[in-house]
Image (spheres, helix red, strand yellow):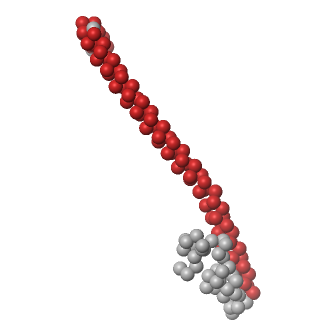
Amino acid sequence: MATTSNTGTPFPTSSSMGESSGGTGVPGSMSGTDTLGSSTEGVDRTLDRFVQGAHQAVDTLAAKAAPAVERLKSSMGTASESMHERADQLSAMQEEWIESARATVREHPIASLAAAVAVGMLISRLTSSR
């Protein structure tokens, strides 16, 4: 496509409309000198206004969406980092609890065995059907 804007996209923008289009805003169209006369000129002007409005709406939407997308990316990155930190903290806490339980079993083996038997009997009574 021959019409490109300064942004490098192959699509015309509202600022590039009217350039190299014979004054109608539509690339490759004539400036109203066709055989149908003034009715075609009116349609061309209406079409030009519609296209211009559509371009402006898309440009406005893109301008408003870009900062929102950047904020979303930033907050997702922050949330991801926070979740990784929390996972690391929980992993460290788990290791501490396991080591603490091992130390308790080593210090009090008979009490640990009695507690394990009591928990087993409790689970057995809760799950047995009468």
User: Is residue 116 in view?
Assistant: no
Give the position of the C terminus as an image quadrant.
top left
Residue 32 coordinates in the image, percent (x, y)? 71, 87
Say whether residue 125 is left or right of residue 44: left
Q: Nearer the viewer, residue 60 or 42?
A: 60
Say whether residue 117 is left or right of residue 8: left
Identified at 63% across, 71% down, the residue is 13
Q: Nearer the viewer, residue 6 or 58?
A: 6
User: Is residue 42 in view?
Assistant: yes
Above or below residue 98? Residue 29 is below
Q: Nearer the viewer, residue 37 or 30?
A: 30
Residue 59 coordinates in the image, percent (x, y)? 64, 64
Residue 42 coordinates in the image, percent (x, y)? 74, 81
Above or below residue 120? Residue 32 is below
Above or below residue 8? Residue 98 is above
Identified at 57% across, 76% down, the residue is 4
Identified at 55% across, 72% down, the residue is 8
The number of numbered discs placed on residues in the rendered structure image is 0
Write down the quadrant of residue 98 in the picture: top left
Say whether residue 22 is left or right of residue 97: right
Identified at 73% across, 90% down, the residue is 37
Write down the quadrant of residue 86 in the picture: top left
Above or below residue 120? Residue 29 is below
Q: Nearer the viewer, residue 129 or 111?
A: 111
Say whether residue 85 is left or right of residue 105: right
Residue 116 coordinates in the image, percent (x, y)? 27, 12
